[in-house]
Image (spheres, rainbow, N blue to C red):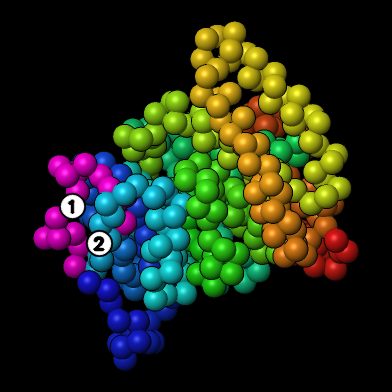
Amino acid sequence: MLIDMHSPDMANAPDPICIIVVSYNTKRFWARQKTALDAQTHQNWFLIIVDNASAPEERLAPHEISERATLIQLEANIGFAAANNLAARRADAGLLALLNPDAFPEPDWLAQLAAASRRWPEAAAFGSRQLLADNSALLDGDGDEMFVLGFPYRGGFHKPVPAAQNEGPCFSACAAAALYRREDFLDAGGFDERFFSYCEDVDLGYRLRLRRRISVQIPSAVVHHVGGASAARTSEFAKFHGRRNRIWVLVKNAPPILLWAILLPHMLITMAGLAKETALGRGGAAWRGFTSAFADAGSLLARRRAVQRRRWASSWSIARCMIWNPFAVAARGSKRHGLKRIRTIWTDARDASG
């Protein structure tokens, strides 16, 4: 059941947080995740679990969930994006903590994210440091970044865990373990439900940046992530949605000057990648995703117009948040601006003309 955030006992507690877990055939991870959540040092939280039409044997029974949890059982798989939006609309809290069902947080995870939300009032989203669940010496991700030619990637993926914390802005927070201010999340429209899965968090982070609300990576907020746990996350599924959604992110969100500057090289690189996959005999799903991206060009352009009408940041201010060095991209590198520097960038973006 939901905790009443308006009760006298909760009214004076710091930072009430709604944790949202979207599950699809991942029941095997629940016991470990419940143990990790119950161990959180920040105790002012409640949980909404959205089950995206898992197989009957993979569904949680009411007696199996936490007493702090509400279970929303869906009879159709509406996708990761829509399921999170559903829970976000129902949540009665100022902060939303999204957590994959195969992500197991350290005891101070929520406390670190809540503290970061107070340190960074200009930020709408906060990413966690993700370690591989079976090898905590390697990163599963340390913030999502964007190459200037329009290719997003997970910073630090499968790289050794750095000794330095380097808290600071990333292009977008990875929604496998992220904190959002609910007001910003809803004001931006939440995740684009057409994405279904993959790149929906990058798309949201981009739209937040267009409205001059940044994402910050918090290395002290640590989760151990299995990755690829969902039965639906097959390689064909990932290739189709990844290719299609990456193009949607670019076309929807890139400000006009930036879009026209990078569209041709982006497409040339994309076509080269498709040719390579075709030569290797595995281009089918990627080609379907590519063609699907433009299947309804009118709708895509209408979505672009809607996003650009709410844009406050200039092309240059957005480009400055991206990774320009292709060698850094190849190394899964991230850039972390210091507090003074990012606030300068934020001020520049605020004052810049569109």
Residue at 66% in and 54% down: 303
Question: Which amino acid lies under the numbered mark 2 shown in the image of this protein?
Answer: Leu
Marks 1 & 2, CB-CB < 8 Å contact = yes
x and y percent of residue 150 in the render? Answer: 71, 38
Residue at 85% in and 68% down: 351
Q: Is residue 258 above or below residue 167?
A: above
x and y percent of residue 206 in the render? Answer: 66, 53
Residue at 63% in and 41% down: 296
The residue at which mark 1 appears reads as 60
Q: Quadrant of the C terminus?
A: bottom right
Left or right: 219, with 153 as reference point:
left
Look at the image and tell me whether residue 336 can be seen. Answer: no
The residue at which mark 2 appears reads as 71
Question: Which amino acid lies under the numbered mark 1 shown in the image of this protein?
Answer: Leu
x and y percent of residue 207 in the render? Answer: 66, 57
* Cα separation between marks 1 and 2: 8 Å
Answer few, some or many: residues within 10 Å of disc 2's Cα (few below 14, many 20 plus, some between 14 and 19).
some
Q: Is residue 189 above or below residue 28?
A: below
Look at the image and tell me whether residue 251 can be seen. Answer: yes
Left or right: 251, with 74 as reference point:
right
Residue 349, numbered circle: none
Secondary structure beneath disc 1? loop
Left or right: 20, with 180 as reference point:
left
Residue 58, quarter of picture: top left
In the image, the segment drawn in magenta is 50-67
Secondary structure beneath disc 2? strand
Between 151 and 159, the one nearer to me in the picture: 151
Left or right: 180, with 338 as reference point:
left
Q: Disc 1 or 2, which lies upstream in sequence?
A: 1
